[in-house]
Image (cartoon, rainbow, N blue to C red):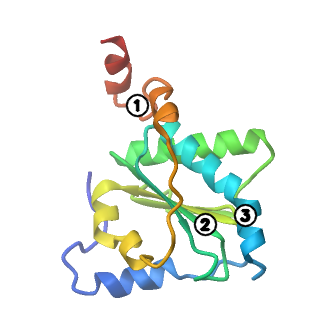
Amino acid sequence: MSEKGLDLGSNEKSANAAAIAKVKINRPATSTVSRAAETQPLAERIARLAAQAKATEISVLRVFELVQYTDWFVIVTGRSDRHVRAIREHIQDALRESGTRPLSVEGTDHNQWVLVDYGDVVVHIFYEPVRAFYELERLWNEAPRLELDLSAEADAAGPDVDGDGDDAAAQAS
């Protein structure tokens, strides 16, 4: 659970978060209200897949009015770097089965903050202390949040998705 190069005490965290979160990804600037409505099902599916992988603090932000490079952010938290990796793999594997592949994936070397870019939806998968440090929801506080009931997906989550052994034990009790 190391911070691997992050200076969590830095006074520049807001500036760093703003710079990192607003990096433009190569994507045509075609977002409109109707386009966001067309891309919302992908954002919802990704949130549900994250819940199946036992991600916590799942937020879906509609950012198409604020940025030109995507329509949605899905921001989720994992309990460990292994859990962050498991969440990413679960999302990618499920979407790959339906023919959807990411444009790019960043941050897999340390699994502290993994970004998976699906063009219309950018997924941020954070390890807990890193998410608390960058506070993306605060940075994007003007973005409307999509409220989803993910309880069914969380209840149906498969055993031991993060490899720590506690999921199977919880299901057995």
Cβ–Cβ under 8 Å for marks 2 and 3:
no
- Please tell me which residue is depicted at 39% across the width and 58% down the height of the picture: 112
The kind of residue on which mark 3 rests is Ala
Q: CA distance from mark 1 to mark 2?
A: 29 Å
Q: Could you say which quadrant of the image residue 130 lies in? A: bottom left
Is 103 positioned to the left or the right of 80 in the image?
A: right
Which numbered disc covers residue 163? 1
Q: CA distance from mark 2 to mark 3?
A: 10 Å
| Residue indicated by mark 3 | 37
Which numbered disc covers residue 30? none
The kind of residue on which mark 2 rests is Trp
Cβ–Cβ under 8 Å for marks 3 and 1:
no
- Please tell me which residue is depicted at 37% across the width and 83% down the height of the picture: 16
Q: Quadrant of the C terminus?
A: top left
Looking at the picture, does residue 72 appear above or below residue 32?
A: above
Q: Earlier in the sequence, mark 3 or mark 1?
A: 3
Looking at the picture, does residue 167 appear above or below residue 147?
A: above
Label 3: which secondary element: helix
Q: How many residues crowd around disc 1 within 10 Å: few (fewer than 14), some, or many (20 or more)?
A: few
Q: CA distance from mark 3 to mark 1?
A: 36 Å
Residue 120 lies, in percent from the top left, at 70, 66
| Residue indicated by mark 2 | 72
Q: How many residues crowd around disc 3 within 10 Å: few (fewer than 14), some, or many (20 or more)?
A: few
Q: Earlier in the sequence, mark 1 or mark 2?
A: 2
Q: Nearer the viewer, mark 2 or mark 3?
A: 3
Label 2: which secondary element: strand
Label 1: which secondary element: loop
Is 49 positioned to the left or the right of 167 in the image?
A: right
Q: Earlier in the sequence, mark 2 or mark 3?
A: 3
